[in-house]
Amino acid sequence: MLTLTAYDSFVEQLFEVMKRFVDALSKASIEYRLIGGMAAFLHVNERNPMVARLTNDVDAAVRREDLQAIINAVKPFGFTYRHVAGVDMLVDSAKPTARSAIHLVFIGEKVRQEYLEPVPGFSPPATTAEGALVASVADLVRMKLTSFRLKDKVHIQDLDGVGLITPEIEAGLPELLRQRLAEVRASD
């Protein structure tokens, strides 16, 4: 069962990296939200663990003005800050690869210039049993429909498939994002 063992090791590593990040920022009282595929996984897993798809990295939304405090807070937890190819990340010092990193995006800023909207500000988070702060479903849907890559569309399908995209969330979207949501639903 080499494949299962390798997968289990990867999952353990991913969650261990996430836990250290969460612990570091919590200890320093720095606000953040887990976003991206990990956030989609956590929300879907809460509803139906059998359909939750694991991501291969961890993304977090933070305030740009907190960056230096974040760099200082995570250092004792084994992370080193890197800015590579336009991406801000906290790399696991022991295993310095992009996949062992926390990728940072900044609230109020566009991740890429061509994206329709900036990363939304902090709304009340969902909180995991371990205390990790996760972007709300409404914020996550907005970000996924803004970036609209294939993996984002899949995450939208997963969130919608377990009933997390409510009529209220849909009504709160601007017209172009509602059109994108309809496109994803039509492709199911």
Image (cartoon, rainbow, N blue to C red):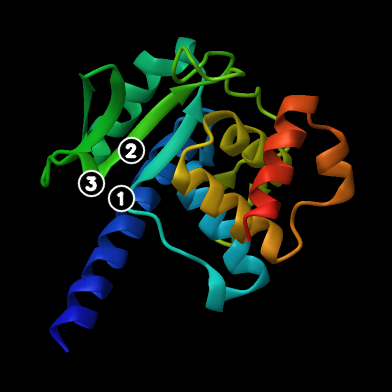
Tell me which amino acid carries mark 2.
Ile
Under circle 1, the secondary element is helix
| Mark identifier at residue 102 | 2
Q: Locate residue 6, reporting x and y percent.
A: 18, 73
Q: How many numbered circles are shown?
A: 3
**Looking at the picture, how far across and down is residue 108, in whole percent?**
59, 14
Tag of residue 182: none
Closer to us: 32 or 56: 56
The crowd level at tag 3 (other Cα within 10 Å; few <14, some 14-19, many 20+) is: many
Question: Residue 60, relative to residue 86: is it above or below?
Answer: below
Q: Would residue 125 be seen by someone viewing this image from the given angle?
A: no
Other-residue count near label 1 (Cα within 10 Å), few / some / many at <14 / 14–19 / ≥20:
many
Q: Tag 1 or tag 2, which sits nearer the N-term?
A: 1
Lower position in the chain sequence, tag 3 or tag 1: 1
Percent from the top left, x then y, of residue 124?
Answer: 73, 37
Tag 2 and tag 1, C-beta contact below 8 Å: yes
Please state the horizontal and vertical placement of residue 60, each as a whole percent of the image: 46, 35
User: Which residue matches tag 3?
Assistant: 100
Circles 3 and 1: CB atoms closer than 8 Å: yes
19 above or below 109? below
> Is residue 116 found left or right of 59 in the rendered image?
right
The residue located at (25%, 60%) in the rendering is 13
Q: Nearer the viewer, residue 14 or 115?
A: 115
Identity, as a three-letter code, of the amino acid under mark 1: Val
Residue beneath the point at 58% across and 23% down: 119
> Which dot, 2 or 1, sits closer to the camera?
2
Residue that carries the numbered disc 1 in the rendered image: 17
Q: From mark 2 to mark 1, how far is it between C-alphas?
A: 8 Å
